[in-house]
């Protein structure tokens, strides 16, 4: 924000802090804009009749410099920027949280799928073992049946002889 004065007649050279107060007040409070016109000069607060005790200042610093004891700057625009930044940060945090939730859900789904796969593989191994056992039993049964047939044939031959 810059201050422009179009005519400097009747403006004193005194730049004390009390004369600079209106420069840093928000327009909402003072009713003034940042550009003073000749008609607005009469709205400038009058110089105090009491003699102000001047504080010693560091060399090269203007009396209206920012620092401890300096008049406050308008906070409205700063608050607006900070609120906008906060909204952006909030939306970024929310998006990150949603992304994390999606990733966690995906991770849970992967773990469930992995557990299901392990279960299916375990069942497969069990079924293969059962099948192998059944094939062996069937093979043994078939051998006994064949042996029984041979014994039956040999007994028939013996009976005929």
Image (spheres, helix red, strand yellow):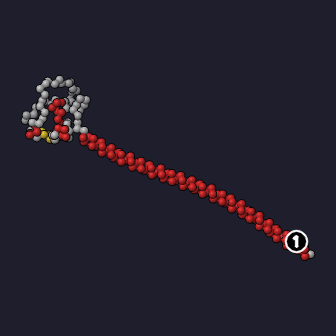
Few, some or many C-alpha atoms within 10 Å of disc 1 (few <14, some 14-19, many ≥20)? few
Residue that sits furthest to the left in the current view: 9
Residue at image position (36%, 48%) is 91
Closer to the camera in the image, 11 or 31: 31
Establish if 3 lies above or below 121: above
Q: Quadrant of the N terminus?
A: top left
Under circle 1, the secondary element is helix
Nearer to the camera, 161 or 63: 161
Q: Position of residue 130 (x, y in %)?
A: 69, 60
Q: What residue is shown at x 39% (from left), y 49% (from top)?
A: 95
Q: Residue at x 25, y 38 (%)?
A: 75
Is 77 above or below relative to 109?
A: above
Q: Is residue 5 above or below residue 104?
A: above
Picture quadrant of residue 161: bottom right
Q: Of all residues shown, which one is farthest toward the bottom? A: 160
Q: Position of residue 83 (x, y in %)?
A: 30, 43
Point out residue 104 in the picture as x, y percentages from the top left corner. Answer: 47, 50
User: What residue did someone put label 1 on?
Assistant: 155
Q: Is residue 156 left or right of residue 123?
A: right
- Residue 18 seen in the figure: yes
Where is residue 120 drawn, in percent x and y? 60, 57
Locate residue 140 relative to residue 81 in the image: left or right.
right
Residue 2 seen in this snapshot: no
Q: Is residue 106 left or right of residue 150?
A: left
């Amino acid at each position: 924000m810059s201050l422009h004065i179009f005519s400097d007649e009747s403006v004193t050279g005194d730049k004390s802090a009390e004369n600079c107060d209106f420069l840093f007040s928000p327009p909402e409070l003072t009713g003034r804009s940042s550009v003073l016109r000749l008609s607005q000069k009469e709205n400038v607060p009058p110089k105090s009749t009491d003699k102000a005790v001047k504080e010693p200042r560091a060399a090269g610093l203007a009396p209206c410099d920012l620092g401890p004891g300096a008049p406050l700057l308008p906070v409205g625009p700063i608050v607006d920027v900070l609120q906008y930044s906060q909204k952006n940060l909030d939306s970024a945090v929310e998006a990150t949280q949603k992304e994390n939730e999606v990733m966690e859900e995906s991770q849970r789904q992967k773990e469930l799928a992995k557990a299901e796969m392990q279960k299916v593989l375990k069942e497969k191994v069990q079924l293969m073992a059962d099948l192998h056992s059944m094939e062996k039993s069937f093979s043994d049964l078939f051998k006994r049946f064949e042996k029984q047939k041979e014994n039956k044939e040999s007994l028939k031959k013996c009976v005929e002889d």
